Image (cartoon, rainbow, N blue to C red):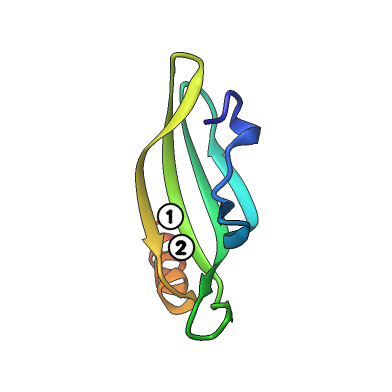
Amino acid sequence: MAETIDEITIKYEEDGQLIVDELDKEILTRGAWTTIIFKYRQWENKLEDFGTEKFTIRRYRKMKGEYKQQSKFNISNKEQAEKIVSTLNRWI
């Protein structure tokens, strides 16, 4: 677990194999509750390579000195991301 917001990552390895490759992150809010959007790729065994870029928004809560994930929303592809951006641009 991460003690600071900047240490939070979704990079994940299993048995020495990188499974989730974090490409970028943007911290949307800071504090005891923090929200971060990540850009990442996930290893696909069928391809024996990383798949297409994906996005996830995650909320973390600091408890007992460590940030723990409380919720997440996965954006599965660029098309879904574009629809979210378009809708938010209309609303704002």
> Where 7 sits versus 88, above or below?
above
Quadrant (top left, top right, bottom left, bottom right) of the C terminus: bottom left
Identify the disc placed on residue 89: 2
For the point 43% across and 34% down, the residue is 60
Q: Determine the secondary structure under disc 1.
A: loop
Q: Measuring 49% from the left and 78% from the top, which residue is drawn there?
A: 45
Horizontal and vertical percent for residue 15? 56, 56
Question: Percent position (x, y) of residue 41?
Answer: 56, 68
Location of residue 23 by image quarter: bottom right
Residue farthest along the front direction in this orientation: 15
Q: Mark 1 points at which residue?
A: 92
In this view, the residue farthest toward the top is 64
Give the residue displayed 46% in from the left and 21% down from the top.
32
Snapshot quadrant of residue 71 = top left
For the view shown, which residue lies furthest in the bottom direction?
47
- Amino acid at the residue labelled 1: Ile
Within 10 Å of the Cα at label 2, are there few (<14), some (14-19), or many (20+) other Cα atoms?
few
- State the SS at label 2: helix
Percent from the top left, x then y, of residue 72? 36, 48
